[in-house]
Image (spheres, coloured by chain):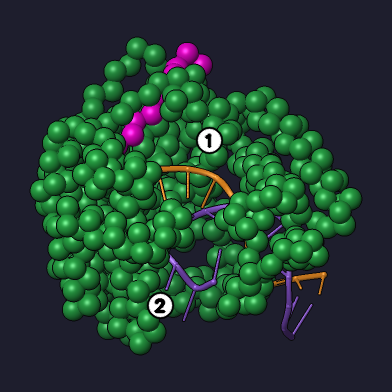
Chain colours: A green, B orange, C purple
Amino acid sequence: MITFGYYGPTLNPSPDMLLKLLDYRGDLGIDIETVSLVDRTPICLAMAISPREAFYFPIDSPMLPWQKLLDPGIRKVFHNASFDVTILERSKGTRVENYVDTIVAAHILGLPPKLTMLAEILSLPIPPNIEDLIGQRGQKQLRMVDVPEENRAEKCARDAEAALAVWEKLEDLIPMEAFNLDMALLPVLGEMEQRGIRVDVLKLEEHKQRLTKEVGFYKQIAKGYGFNPGSSMQVAYVLGSRGHPIKYKRSTGKPIMDEEMLTTMYRDDPIAQLVLLYRRSRVLLSTFVEAILNKHLVGDRIHPHFNLWPRSGRLSTTPNSQNIPVAIRNIYIPSDGNEFEVWDLEQIELRVVAYLSQDSAMLQMFANGEDVHEATARDLNVDRGTAKTLNYAILYGGDAHTLFVRGGIPMDKGKMYLERYFAKFRGIKAWIDETKAGVMQTGYAITMLGRKRGFPDVQSSNYFKREKALREAINHPIQGTAAEIQKRSAIAVASYPLVNIVHDENDFDKPVGMDIPIPLNLAPFETPVEIGRGKNWKDAKS
DNA sequence: CTCAAAAGCGCG
DNA sequence: AAAGCGCGCTTTTGAG
């Protein structure tokens, strides 16, 4: 054991120093160091009882008071709890309860997640930088286990202190409902990660064979025309030589050759069609099929890690389990004897808009159980497609220009539609204006439960930066509130076999007879759930 | 050669 | 195309 105080480490602490720790019942800052980020074997642990008092223990030290960690009466403070808690639970074989996470708190307040940066922002002592111990990123780095113990001990202890100190400052600032939601979600995500999703490996191999053939075929044809279909520069060159005008990005001067351009400007040229076909097959093959087969498979399952760091409050996953193409979703299958069940929160983002704005017309549409795009179309006297584009433009802060680019609606018509839209949905217009005014004044936007995200660019002198920030600020409460509702739904079904969460969707791998009750009261408004079941993910969604 | 940035695309 | 939001991942590009 080494103790750390205001003046530095004490190598031979007196017995009453340990007694002080044993008697302590307040919040306990914790940090664990492992062999490396890859090898998560724990090597040491520190406990902080104040922002400048910590105790360091090698992991096998007989003096390490494990009972402090496992005592549900003592609140533990971690920085990145999902890392440390997983390690603790694995090595001690028991649940860790009653803890808070400063990284979760930081995300909810829209603050940077690095402990050193949080300490700096909050005017606290700054803990050692990991790169000073193991070397800069991109260079050859040491493993933590190779760092001299005195440096490692200092790092571990100071991090434990900093976590505690940061928590003490943030506790009063944080919107507790949003924070408790994420803390409650952490163990649910942990279980889901452990459970993993089953993959039909044979089916995956079939996809691989087919796609490999397709990619080779398209490539061969392109070669006949003398270009690599994977290179936008070469595609542009070929299209240019066939007499097509080429558009260039203003910022980089490179040709724009994305799907949008190929399906509009170059639609009639078979070269464009070839490139589109090639890209589609290549992405399916290398980004999905081969990646799963070669990198993510553990037995016949993948175990994505769920991250809580997206700025809006959504989840993200590594490897990504949220962008699996519909075309290959039949590779996600249930365990033997089970079926796949999919829950979708219906039109959750537009319901959130209706709630946040309290717009009477849109609230009424939902109250009537109408198809909201259909109803919008009827009320604005436009077709359903236009109505849908209009509704989505609102979600993302778009304007007439958006309607032009996304929906091909001429600018003058778009302006007219928007006027009609805001005349019908006056509350939405008012909410957008209020939200913009709010972010201009305070610098941040906020979700239903109080999650914040800062938008410094609303003060930018650059028109485009400013407008972008305002669009993001409009979207944040919508996307973020929808995420909060989805998180509540995942927590509510925590005791059921959840295998994936895709933004507004819960996926289960469940016994055929199992009836999972739909949670009620997820929000202060109706949140209907559409349920599908099937023999694989794709089947369950259609 | 290596490496970071950009382009492009999958999903909600 | 600096003009809808949020992500993660692969390949190409171009600078050193």
**Mark 1 is on which residue type?**
Val
Residue C1 drawn above or below residue A42: below
**Mark 2 is on which residue type?**
Phe
The boundaries of the magenta stretch are: A336-345
Residue shown at 33% from the left, 16% from the top: A514
**Quarter that holds the C terminus of chain A:** top left
What residue did someone put label 2 on? Answer: A464
Choose the circle earlier in sequence order: 2 or 1: 1
Residue shown at 79% from the left, 36% from the top: A213
Residue shown at 67% from the left, 55% from the top: A266
Say left or right for A286 vs A311.
right
**Closest to the observer: A304 or A10?**
A304
User: Dot 2, crowdedness within 10 Å: few (<14), some or many (≥20)?
Assistant: few
In percent of width and height, residue A372 lies at 25, 40
Query: Do we see residue A475 in this rendering?
Result: no
Q: Chain of mark 1?
A: A
Q: Chain of mark 2?
A: A
Circle 2 SS class: helix
**Quarter that holds the N terminus of chain A:** bottom left
In percent of width and height, residue B10 lies at 55, 45
User: Dot 1, crowdedness within 10 Å: few (<14), some or many (≥20)?
Assistant: few
| Residue A342 on the magenta span | yes
Say left or right for A111 vs A153.
left
Q: CA distance from mark 2 to mark 1?
A: 34 Å
- For the image shown, how many numbered marks are present on the structure? 2
What residue did someone put label 1 on? Answer: A326
Residue shown at 72% from the left, 36% from the top: A211
Q: Quadrant of residue A137?
A: bottom right
